[in-house]
C-alpha cells in the first residue's frame, strides 16, 4: 500500500486537532467517505494518519459548497468568507463608493426587459502596480504591458444570484464592470485575459468568484469601479478600489 509522509498533506481535519510528527505516515483510506449523502472521491484521495481521516482542502470545500482560495499576497489558505452585512444601495454612491469587502445589493429592474435579476456583489481584494502587472503577464504571455504612465489593477469579485426573471440564467460578466478614476473619468477597458470565472451562467442560488481587470493611472489615489450602469450612467452600484 502506498504511504505518504504526512508533511506533504494539505487537508481538512475531520476528527480533532493533532500535531504531526515527521515520522507519521499516511495511507489511502480503505473505506467510503460520504458527504451530504454522496460518496466523496478526490485526487489525492482521503488519507488516514494515526486513525484520523484527512481530506484535501479544496476538494472538501467544493463538496460542501464552501469557497477555498490561496491568497498568494498573504501566503495563506482561505476557507469560506467573512463579509460584512449586506448594505442597501442608498448608503453608497459614485461619490461615496462602498469599501472593500462590503456586500452590496444590486437589482436590475428595467420596465421593458425580460432579463431582470438581483444579486449580492462584493469586492474582496484589490491588487495594483507591479504585482498586478506580474499576474497579468503570468496569466497569458500575449497580455500586453500597461500604457505609459498607467498600471493594471485587479479586483476579486464575489457574485451571488438572488432572483432571476422567469428563472433565466445570468452571468456576472466582467463586461458589466467599469473602472473610473478618483475624479470620475472612465478608464478604457484593457484587452487582457486573467480568468473567465465571472462569465459562466448561474441560476438562482449560484455563485461566481473571479477577477476583473482595469488599467488606471499610476498616480490615481482613489480609483473605483461600477457594476450595472445603464446607458445614462445611472442605476449601478459603486465600489472603492483603495
Image (spheres, rainbow, N blue to C red):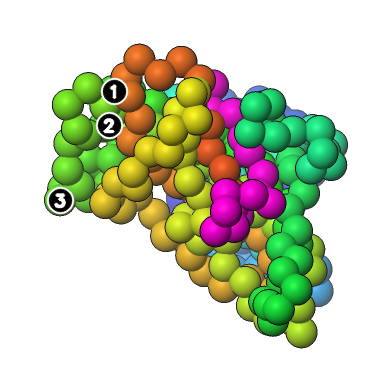
For marks 2 and 1, give the CA distance.
5 Å
Q: Position of residue 69 (x, y in %)?
A: 55, 42
Residue that numbered label 3 is attached to: 142
Q: Nearer the viewer, residue 19 or 167?
A: 167
Residue 145 horizontal/vertical position (percent): 17, 36
Extreme-front residue of the structure: 232
Q: Is residue 73 magenta?
A: no
Q: Is residue 240 magenta?
A: yes
Residue placed at 57% from the left, 73% from the top?
A: 201
Circle 2: element type: helix
Above or below: residue 224 compared with residue 158: above
Label 3: element kind: loop
Q: Position of residue 175 (x, y in %)?
A: 46, 58
Q: Identify the residue at horizontal 46%, vertical 15% (top origin).
A: 221
The segment highlighted magenta reads: 228-242
The residue wearing badge 1 is: 130
Amino acid at each position: 500500500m502506498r504511504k505518504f509522509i504526512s508533511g506533504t498533506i494539505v487537508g481538512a481535519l475531520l476528527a480533532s486537532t493533532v500535531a504531526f510528527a515527521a515520522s507519521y505516515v499516511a495511507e489511502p483510506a480503505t473505506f467510503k467517505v460520504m458527504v451530504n449523502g454522496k460518496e466523496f472521491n478526490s485526487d489525492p484521495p482521503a488519507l488516514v494518519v494515526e486513525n484520523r481521516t484527512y481530506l484535501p482542502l479544496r476538494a472538501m470545500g467544493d463538496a460542501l459548497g464552501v469557497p477555498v482560495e490561496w491568497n498568494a499576497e498573504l501566503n495563506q489558505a482561505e476557507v469560506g468568507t467573512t463579509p460584512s452585512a449586506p448594505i442597501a444601495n442608498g448608503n453608497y454612491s459614485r461619490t461615496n463608493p462602498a469599501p472593500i469587502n462590503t456586500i452590496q445589493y444590486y437589482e436590475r429592474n428595467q420596465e421593458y426587459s425580460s432579463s431582470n435579476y438581483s444579486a449580492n456583489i462584493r469586492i474582496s481584494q484589490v491588487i495594483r502596480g507591479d504585482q498586478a502587472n506580474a499576474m497579468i503577464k503570468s496569466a497569458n504571455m500575449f497580455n500586453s504591458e500597461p500604457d505609459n504612465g498607467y498600471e493594471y489593477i485587479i479586483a476579486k469579485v464575489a457574485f451571488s444570484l438572488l432572483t432571476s426573471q422567469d428563472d433565466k440564467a445570468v452571468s456576472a460578466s466582467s463586461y458589466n464592470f467599469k473602472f473610473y478614476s478618483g475624479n470620475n473619468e472612465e478608464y478604457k477597458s484593457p484587452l487582457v485575459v486573467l480568468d473567465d470565472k465571472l462569465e459562466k451562467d448561474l441560476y438562482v442560488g449560484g455563485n461566481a468568484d473571479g477577477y476583473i481587470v482595469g488599467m488606471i493611472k499610476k498616480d490615481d489615489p482613489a480609483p473605483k469601479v461600477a457594476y450595472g450602469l445603464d446607458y445614462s450612467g445611472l442605476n449601478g452600484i459603486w465600489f472603492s478600489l483603495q
